[in-house]
Image (cartoon, helix red, strand yellow):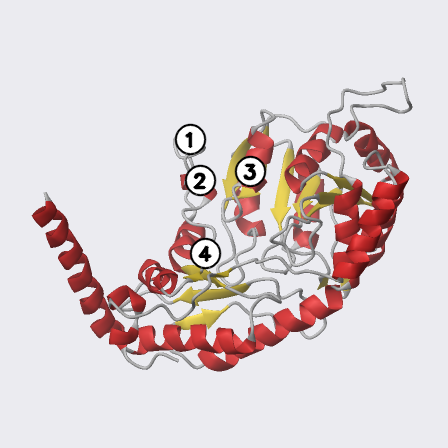
Amino acid sequence: MKRSLDELAVLGGTPAFGEPLHVGRPNLGDRDLLLNRIGDILDSRWLTNSGRFLREFEDRVASVTGARRAVAVANATLGLQLTAKALGVTGRVAVPSFTFIGSVTAFSWIGIEPVFIDIEASNHVISPTDLSAALEQHEVGAIVGVHLWGHECDTDALERIAADHGVPLILDAAHAFGTTHRGRPTGTSGRAEVFSFHATKFVNSFEGGVITTDDDALADELELLRNFGFAGYDLVESGGINAKMSEVSAAMGLTSIEAMDRFIAHNRHIYEVYRGALGDLPGVRLVGHDAVDDQCNFQYIVLELADGSAIDRDELARVLWAENVFVRKYFAPGCHRAAPFADLDHRALPHTDDATRRVLCLPTGTALSEQEALAISSIIRLCLENANALRGGLDRAAASRSSGSLDRR
């Protein structure tokens, strides 16, 4: 544990960690079971095209989410695109700006432009109030809600708004596998929900995504679209693309789901460690995972710094990176200010802009130990309890580097 500012690596000390600590380092299930499944795949010579393990994986996802159907795809980006295509979405979609850029570029890549919506300040999910205001001014072909940090957005409100405007609701559920909302598993809201099983998600399939829906006709169309539109060996019924998940990815997905309870238990423990170490620190808020009646996957540990702190979020991130703690500034600067969309006309998004200045995601997952979480917490506490002195040290270090650069010239 570091106890003085001069021990900080950013001020000349030795990094606290010899190996980098990451947000979203992959969780691994039973290695032997996975390798046995891969052996079965090789023995069968059925490597893709809806083999045994893909069908089993889809059934398991449907069971966890409570959905009638689950359609596995190569990644969640393609899942969003196929869903929009199957639903006939055109024009523009209403989507929060405070989300991963892929939630938006998935649509812009197929000619569907965003109308950006602000978020709720308390939990960072899309604001139904701001959505309603935006739809008074803009016509859209669909509403895209995004679940965040292991919590659902207000799907009941979004479904009412979507019905009032006669447009489909699509849910980006990349953060929300294995969660519940008001006692109901995430996965059956809107016309479809799209989950990510990318390697950084707490349950992963190496790379992959799944679309869940209670609409059999929609699921049938999605299955056609993911395989070039083929309804049989030589019969093409629609203009699809190649969005299939491989058998080896499905095997990894199955193995991960079987370890899901262990992953969640570990993530929850790490969250409690951070909360115990930082919960009383003025100017710091950990986004809560405390709903009594609902299950969270605890996939993200989200720290939010108060305005007016003597050290800001970017400076704290700089300190932690120097210690080999690779925190993430999700989702700065907000999709509406990111390069692909910065030149578009935008509505005011004050809560989004505020969150992008204050949010920091901390390492978690089964690769992180309790002792490492405590050590990270001690660095954060050291920085914030000595913020004025740290700010001076950072300014002097920056001036010294600048002077050194001038001298070398």
The residue mark sitting in front, 2 or 4, is 4
Q: Position of 300 compared to 350: left or right?
A: right
User: Is residue 241 in sight in this rendering?
Assistant: yes
Q: Nearer the viewer's eye, disc 4 or disc 1? A: 4
Quarter in which the C terminus is drawn: top left
Pointers 3 and 4 in contact (C-beta within 8 Å): no
Which amino acid type is marked by label 4? Arg
Mark sitting earlier along the chain (1/2): 2
Query: Label 2 is placed on what type of residue?
Result: His
Residue 170 higher or lower than 344, as above or below: below
In the rendered view, does 218 fall on the left or right side of 27?
Answer: right
Disc number for residue 328: 4
Q: Are marks 1 and 2 in contact (CB under 8 Å)?
A: yes
Tell me the CA gap for discs 2 and 4: 19 Å
Residue beneath the point at 54% across and 61% down: 123
Q: Residues within 10 Å of mark 1 (few under 14, many from 20)?
A: few
- For the residues labelled 2 and 3, the Cα–Cα distance comes to 10 Å
Would you say the residues marked 4 and 1 are in contact, meaning their CB atoms lie under 8 Å apart?
no
Cα distance, mark 1 to mark 2?
8 Å
Q: Secondary structure at mark 3?
A: helix
Of callouts 4 and 1, which one flags the residue occurring earlier in the amino acid sequence? 4
Residue matched to label 2: 336
Q: Residue at x 28, y 70 (%)?
A: 13
Residue 185 in view of the camera: no
Badge 2 marks a residue whose secondary structure is: helix
| Real-space CA distance between mark 3 and mark 1, rounded to the nearest whole angstrom | 13 Å
Task: Residue 401: give x, y in percent of width and height.
Answer: 17, 55
Relative to the observer, which residue lies in front, 139 or 326? 326
x and y percent of residue 120 in the render?
52, 57
